[in-house]
Amino acid sequence: MPGNVILEIKNLHVYYLTETETAKAVRGVNLEIRAGESVGLVGETGAGKTTTCLSVMRLVPDPPGVIVDGEINFKGENLIFADEKRCRAIRGEGISMIFQDPMTALNPVMTVGEQLMEVVREHNKKLSKAEAKALVIRSLERVGVKGDRFNDYPHQFSGGMKQRVIITMALLCEPELLIADEPTTALDVTIQAQVLDIIRGLQRETGASMLLVTHDLGVVAETCDRVAIMYAGNIVELGTVKEVFRNKRHPYTEGLFNSIPRLENENRRLMPIDGLPPNPADLPEGCAFHPRCRRRLPICEREAPPMKGEGHIYACHL
Amino acid sequence: MGTLLEVKHLNKHFNVASGTLFAVDNVSFSIDEGNTLGIVGESGCGKSTLGRAILRLHEPTSGRVIFDGMDVTSFNDEEMRQMRRHMQIIFQDPYSSLNPRLTISQSIEEPLRVFQKYMGDRERKARVEELMELVGLSARSYNAYPHEFDGGRRQRVVIARTLAVNPKFVVCDEPVSALDVSVQAQILNLMVDLREKMGLTYIFISHDLSVVRYISDNVGVMYMGQMVEFASKKDIFDDPAHPYTHALMSAIPSIEVGRRRMILKGEIVSPINPKPGCRFSARCPFVKEVCVARDVPIEEIAPGHYCACARHKEIKGLPFVYAN
């Protein structure tokens, strides 16, 4: 069962500064991840999901991205003040990330084996070449890639197989926290099911924690313990998957669920959220969701809502 | 209502370096006027090629497409051009299907300039405004350019352009796949409303079964160029016969917490020079000699329910597990 807090994101603010405008991508995110648990981070394009992950990895492109405020405590160490050398040590062994697009995450002119060897030898210089190769082959076979594909190039792999290679790469150094940024979005459904199954299995086996970014609530329901719903740079609702899915408190969460056609009941007219997500460089006053909210009150236009509730928390005046 | 479109033994093969790619392999079906046929399948199964071959955007290798009683596969270029007024298509990516140098009103009026040459300027402007209102675009954006719009509103422009010539039939090739869920729902509702209002007939191509269930009357499931199952929406979802349909439905993550599902082994094999026998046999847990011995034709297993599985009777109701 979930143990100690391993990652604590406190009041994180990340802005992208350009000459003409400031895009406030992340505005005060608070999130804790405990050892062994998996947390889903859900939101639409531009909600700040990927920026949050990149901040934890200290990979926000700078310029234009700047972490303007907040703390990222990984096992008690504030990563914001870590230097590049320390960051490199943490990446891979402490925290590791799987990126969305398996087609672009691998180097096309290196064999898959070489790329994986590079990871092992960078982090564990004591291993001999033969030992490293054995470790890579063992890890590949664990995710269902045959060892004889060691000398193949990425273009010889299908999308699902490439994603398995990337998962192997992320887990080679046995990180304590795995960040998976839309790991299955580019894959077909039957392949997505296989890949999610592998991720879940490995996570259980190694006891790693996971932060899974997705826009697919179905993936969250099947993979995560807790879920955070993000809108316009803020977490608007957070709780266990059961609580949030059965007892939605924030109008945005409700809107997201009503927008999804369900396999279970047909012919129900969809109830989409009116309007569009706001421009992060020009956010509305008060609650960022109020222009699209059907239940808004006068106060929503003036004041940002406080976080309410215990355990299952949500940011809404209602 | 009568049959609007009939597709008979349609084939589209591509010659590639390593042989022949069977993108669409002997597909037959028909659609009644006012109905929506959903086509589902994974990438590379030939669903987009099928949509394009019906409109002859890809010239079919063989087979017939009968639209409104006319064999459009026998038409010459000019006849086909006139026919396109009745048969339109909406593409997946609204970012690449609009000309970035035209204002959205210029994009919407282009089909009118092609097909209704004698329409006056004022009349045409009125028609464009009417279309923009129809799809929920404000008149203020008349002179806007596509880059000022997000994906959802661009897809509205594409829909307005498609409907400008009052088509009877529209192929919708993954029209909502590039959109976020909240916007996707807006566009789906719009498409349903327009179908009722204008009496449209859709072929709705998607990899998303829940979207297809929402919008379709009949559903066809494709695998490696072949139609493996075709039935009413109710039959496909409540009583699927083909193991691949089962697998596809089971693979979709559901927002119902705690649902169990089965996971298909293996990957889609190449549709280049396929081996004889059922194309799905390599991944199917129920595979027997009969499946690989010869091709399995699609046949009617119940009224209106077609399935291409040699063992569909034997495996009905069996649990979907892999023997190790």
Image: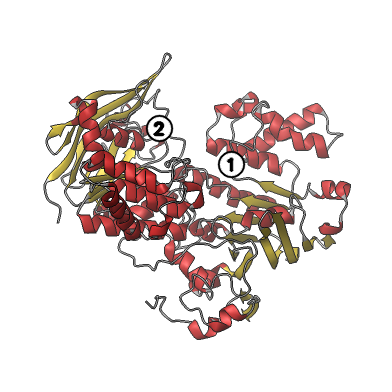
Q: To which residue does mark 1 refer?
A: B93
Q: Nearer the viewer, residue B95 or A82?
A: A82
Name the residue at the top extreme: A19
**Where B11 falls versus B290 (above or below)?**
above
Look at 42% across and 13% down and name the residue there: A19
**Where B28 falls versus A2 (above or below)?**
below
Q: Whole-percent x and y of residue B261?
A: 37, 67
Type of amino acid under label 2: Pro
Q: Which quarter of the image is occupied by the N terminus of chain B?
A: bottom right
Cα distance, mark 1 to mark 2? 28 Å
Q: Which quarter of the image is occupied by the C terminus of chain B?
A: bottom left
State the image quarter where residue B273 is shown. Answer: bottom right
Look at 57% across and 79% down and name the residue there: B291
Q: Whole-percent x and y of residue B314?
A: 51, 86
Type of amino acid under label 1: Asp
**Within 10 angstroms of label 2, few (less than 14), some, or many (20 or more) residues?**
some
Q: Secondary structure at mark 1?
A: loop
Q: To which residue does mark 2 refer?
A: A291
| Residue B53 - label | none
Look at 60% across and 60% down and name the residue there: B39
State the image quarter where residue B222 is shown. Answer: bottom right
Q: Whole-percent x and y of residue A60?
A: 33, 29
Host chain of mark 2: A
Name the residue at the bottom extreme: B314
Look at 56% across and 60% down and name the residue there: B40
Q: Determine if marks 1 and 2 fall on one subunit.
A: no
Q: Secondary structure at mark 2?
A: helix
